[in-house]
Image: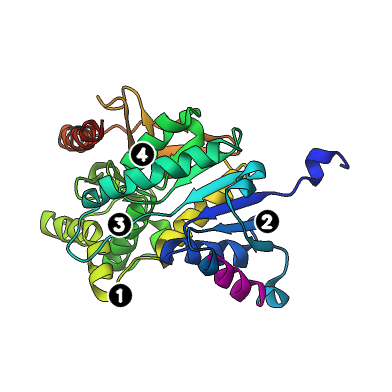
Amino acid sequence: MTTSSALKPSRVVIIGMGAVGTTTGYTLMLRQRSSELVFVDVNHDKATGEMLDMNHGLPFTGGVKVWAGDYSDCKDADIIIITAGASQKPGETRIDLLKKNASIFKDIIDRITEVNSHGILLIATNPVDILSYTSWKQSGWPASRVIGSGTLLDSARFRYLIGKNKGIDPRSIHAHIIGEHGDSEVPVWSLANVAGTDLELDEETQQDIFNSTKNAAYEIINAKGATSYAIALALDRIVAAILGNEGSVLNVSTLLEDYNGVSDVYLGVPCVVDRHGVREILPLPLNETEKLAFQASASKLKEQIAGLE
């Protein structure tokens, strides 16, 4: 193929070069997910420093053009990852960040949509579900192209902890965390399995695993100040699914309409992700306890959204 579309480079822009943005950039560079990688930060010197540091490693990896840019570089971006905003402090919940980051996001989304109307917004800043919802509203883009990182990381933590308990590779554990990426998230124990077989975990063990999953970010933040590596790998996984047109099932945050009794809110659920963003939302047959918890998670977030209006 020699068409111009076949020759068009793929571009990922990362806005916000803090711990998450920087680690995501490094992960994308190492895995050569796109041909162009652009770093944007309110502190341009920081973005430049990160760019230079990574560029000096290109002789060992190659394949990616990396530069520090500005919002004009979003024009030709396939994916724009937003990690900018105030970070979660020890003792602070994701919801505590809401008003700070909602204000920051208003300016960011306006500046992106001035130059780009075709890309995919991938939101990682917390509280990610609410900021994904407000970004969708403000951008005017189809909900399929405004995606939150959702409970993809929570589900990975869940699978890791179950696998650790059972002595099984976490990649062979099939288990979901759905709902809010935060304190009201819901473990779907009724569907958790290994190769279709029940996990056979007692109720106390299940509660311990879920508590460790839910509180993982707080534990990491208290210990080292910020989470970065696992969320970067989660974002890399979403980017790979989009640019590779994979049709992979990932627990990302998307707009729900009549999903287990929930509508008009972004929450993390299993979705088919491909070149167009969220292609399909997969229904989960939740039991009554899980359904009620999921609905409560949605109600909590809708109250927070209403408080912004």
For the C terminus, the quadrant is: top left
Is residue 54 covered in magenta?
yes
Of the image marks 2 and 4, the number of the one nearer the N terminus? 2
Residue type at numbered disc 1: Lys
Of the image marks 1 and 3, the number of the one nearer the N terminus? 3
Q: What residue is disc 4 on?
A: 269
Q: What residue is disc 3 on?
A: 158
Residue 98 screen position, x and y as percent: 27, 46
Q: What residue is disc 2 on?
A: 36
Q: What residue is disc 1 on?
A: 224
Q: Nearer the viewer, residue 194 or 162?
A: 162
Q: Residue furthest top?
A: 258
Q: Which residues are magenta?
A: 47-56
Of the image marks 1 and 2, the number of the one nearer the N terminus? 2
Residue 220 screen position, x and y as percent: 28, 69
**Relative to 231, is 184 on the left or the right?**
left
Whether residue 269 is visible to the viewer of this picture, yes or no, is yes
Q: Residue at x 16, y 33 (%)?
A: 292
